[in-house]
């Protein structure tokens, strides 16, 4: 518990903690991106958008009736 009291946000330990967390989050996002890219599951196509637009049109037609 005493160790946590020593870490301050503006000091050296706070800076190290900040950069460690930034590297951890960015690194994990990059690893997930590479994994999804390797298995070709990035899903950057437009098909889901068109499918949702069709569903919205069907719902609006159902409300008008």
Image (cartoon, rainbow, N blue to C red):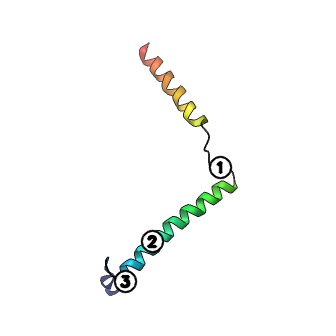
Q: Where is 23 relative to 59, above or below?
A: below
> Residue at the spot x=31%, y=78% of the render?
10
Residue highlighted by disc 3: 12
Q: Is residue 10 above or below residue 45?
A: below
**Disc number placed over residue 21 in the picture, else none:** 2
Q: Quadrant of residue 35?
A: bottom right
Q: Earlier in the sequence, mark 1 or mark 2?
A: 2
The quadrant in which residue 13 appears is bottom left
Q: Is residue 25 left or right of residue 11?
A: right
The secondary element bearing badge 2 is classed as helix
Indicate left or right for 30 with 6 as reference.
right
In this view, the residue in front, 49 or 60, is 49
Q: Nearer the viewer, residue 62 or 47?
A: 47
Disc 1 is placed on an element classified as loop
Q: Label 1 neighbourhood size at 10 Å, few (<14), some (14-19), many (20+)? A: few
Q: Is residue 12 above or below residue 48?
A: below
Q: Earlier in the sequence, mark 3 or mark 1?
A: 3
**Residue at image x 60%, y 58%?**
33
Q: Position of residue 54 (x, y in %)?
A: 54, 26
Q: Estimate the spatial distance between the alpha carbons at disc 2 and disc 3, rounded to whole Å.
A: 14 Å
Sequence-wise first label, 2 or 3: 3
Q: CA distance from mark 1 to mark 2?
A: 27 Å
Name the residue carrying label 1: 41
Q: Can you say which quadrant of the picture contains the C terminus?
A: top left
Count of numbered tags: 3
Q: CA distance from mark 3 to mark 1?
A: 41 Å
Q: Are marks 3 and 1 in contact (CB under 8 Å)?
A: no
Query: How many residues crowd mark 3 within 10 Å: few (<14), some (14–19), many (20+)?
Result: few
Residue drawn 62% across the image and 40% down it:
45
Figure check: 9 above or below 41: below
> Which mark identifies residue 28?
none
């Amino acid at each position: 518990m005493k160790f946590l009291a020593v870490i301050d946000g503006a000091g050296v330990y706070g800076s190290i903690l900040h950069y460690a967390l930034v590297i951890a989050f960015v690194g994990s996002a990059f690893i997930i991106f590479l994994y999804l890219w390797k298995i070709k599951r990035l899903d950057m196509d437009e098909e889901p958008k068109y499918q949702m637009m069709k569903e919205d049109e069907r719902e609006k037609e159902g409300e008008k009736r």
